[in-house]
Image (cartoon, helix red, strand yellow):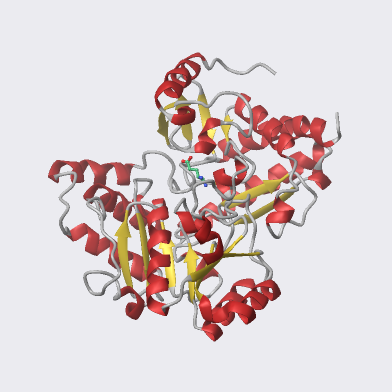
């Protein structure tokens, strides 16, 4: 199968490897899991990305989720242009921070206060510190295959790039933390109950992706999130929802609104900055008021509440507010997943592939499934995914360059784009079938 020219990407990759470890600033981008060299992108517009060799791709990654409106949505671009005229960073309070905080609290009715940071990693890292301080306990529970950024206590049995590269527990994480982070199985409430019945009084918090989207896409089983709420409440531990991917994505108020669960703390990320570097965490007032300067728990940052990120976030959330936005996203997603299922079945691999989706957050495994946890997710045939990915790319569709990620539908995708993706998947599933059928 002939690939479009990647001459300039290759040259840039060569240069990059001299000056950036692995040639990339975030590991999954290196294409190690799918083979070939990474693409370097020149620009994006609406549903498309163009690489530096001028090849156009329909984008199903959307900067790993935040680009719900597609690339360069006019409202966000206009807000950024206005903001840039005023100044790019003050390291001091500004009005847009207050407005974005109000908008977030309106979207998440159980959140009473919110603090802006610069990334999802910072949000989850600080949420844990806060939970420890609030409860006076040290240990935290996370679920195998969930990814909450790359702070030490959370880089244990982690998903996403860590799983893709085969280092779910990274070297460099202090040995002592292996004891303070307890790893449980996603969707297994009895396992969690056992943990709590033996060391419940030491557990400060349970942190979870309410829809796990970093080991591929794994949905919460009915009752799982309710069970987490019940168990944590019973034992006086906090429940932290990492909604970096699901917040404002699966609906305006995130997974907690959809599944009607009220966590104690919520972490948000890039979506609330329309793709600019930003994160936030928020929750109950009595917990949040422990943060400095109201309380003693320290967290700070010159770029926290950065005016450009705030302006982009406010514009983005305004665009997401009308109700039909999520209906439109859902109908595009349904159409896409229906077409891809049909394509898999036409290619003779329908019973060897399983799909999952919540609104515009989609996933696919090359295993019959069901995939309910990390062990099942890692049964996916990653060579089949790699072949599928390469054929999609050859046909101009850019998907996540790793099996253990989700894919994301955006509002800029037209029916014609969706049909092109489905058409490309017909031959991509055939390619994957060569591996799946042992050819
Ligand atoms: N680990 C991120 C996705 N879950 C990838 C981030 C990136 O490469 O930009």
Is any atom of residue 38 visible in this view? yes
Is any atom of residue 53 visible in this view? no
Q: Nearer the viewer, residue 60 or 221?
A: 221
6 lies left or right of 188? left
Q: Residue 422 is drawn in which quadrant?
A: top right
Number of numbered discs present? Answer: 0
Work out whether 399 lies above or below 145: above
Q: Quadrant of the C terminus?
A: top right
Q: Nearer the viewer, residue 365 or 311?
A: 365
Which residue appears at 16% of the width and 59% of the height? Answer: 93
Return the residue found at the far front: 175
Return the residue found at the far bottom: 234
168 lies left or right of 84? right
Where is residue 160 drawn, in percent x and y?
Answer: 56, 47
Q: Quadrant of the N terminus?
A: top right
Where is residue 226 drawn, in percent x and y?
Answer: 60, 77
Work out whether 364 lies above or below 218: above
Which residue appears at 57% of the width and 79% of the height? Answer: 200
Work out whether 204 lies above or below 299: below
212 lies left or right of 343? left
Q: Nearer the viewer, residue 297 or 359?
A: 297
Where is residue 95 drawn, in percent x and y?
Answer: 17, 60
Where is residue 316 drawn, in percent x and y?
Answer: 35, 52
């Amino acid at each position: 199968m002939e690939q479009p020219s990647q001459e300039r990407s290759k040259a840039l990759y060569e240069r990059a490897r001299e000056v950036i470890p692995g040639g990339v600033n975030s590991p999954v981008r290196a294409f190690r899991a799918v083979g070939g060299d990474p693409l370097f992108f020149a620009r994006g517009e609406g549903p498309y990305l163009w690489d530096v060799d001028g090849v156009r791709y329909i984008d199903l990654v959307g900067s790993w989720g935040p680009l719900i409106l597609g690339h360069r949505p006019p409202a966000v671009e206009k807000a950024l242009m206005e903001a840039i005229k005023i100044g790019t960073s003050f390291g001091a309070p500004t009005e847009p921070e207050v407005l974005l905080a109000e908008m977030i609290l309106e979207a998440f009715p159980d959140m009473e206060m919110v603090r802006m940071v610069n990334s999802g990693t910072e949000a989850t890292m600080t949420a844990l510190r806060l939970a420890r301080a609030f409860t006076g306990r040290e240990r935290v529970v996370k679920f195998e295959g969930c990814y909450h950024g790359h702070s030490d206590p959370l880089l244990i049995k982690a998903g996403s790039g860590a799983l893709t590269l085969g280092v779910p527990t990274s070297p460099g994480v202090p040995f002592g933390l292996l004891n303070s982070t307890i790893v449980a199985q996603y969707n297994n409430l009895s396992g969690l109950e056992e943990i709590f019945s033996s060391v419940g009084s030491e557990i400060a918090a349970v942190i979870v992706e309410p829809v796990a989207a970093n080991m591929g896409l794994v949905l919460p089983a009915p009752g799982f999130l309710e069970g987490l709420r019940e168990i944590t409440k019973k034992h006086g531990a906090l429940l932290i929802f990492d909604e970096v991917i699901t917040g404002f994505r699966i609906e305006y108020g995130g997974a907690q609104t959809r599944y009607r669960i009220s966590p104690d703390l919520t972490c948000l990320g890039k979506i609330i900055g329309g793709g600019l570097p930003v994160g936030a965490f928020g929750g109950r007032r009595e917990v949040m008021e422990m943060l400095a300067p109201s309380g003693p728990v320290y967290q700070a940052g010159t770029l926290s509440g950065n005016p450009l990120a705030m302006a982009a976030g406010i514009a983005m959330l305004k665009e997401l507010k009308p109700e039909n936005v999520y209906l439109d996203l859902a109908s595009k997603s349904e159409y896409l997943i229906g077409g891809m299922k049909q394509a898999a079945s036409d290619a003779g691999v329908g019973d060897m592939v399983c799909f999952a989706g919540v609104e515009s957050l989609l996933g696919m495994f090359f295993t019959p499934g069901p995939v309910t946890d990390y062990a099942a997710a890692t049964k996916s045939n990653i060579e089949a995914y790699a072949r599928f990915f390469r054929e999609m790319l050859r046909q101009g569709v850019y998907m996540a360059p790793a099996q253990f990620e989700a894919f994301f539908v955006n509002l800029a995708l037209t029916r014609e784009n969706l049909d092109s993706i489905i058409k490309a998947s017909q031959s991509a599933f055939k390619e994957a079938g060569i591996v799946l059928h042992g050819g």
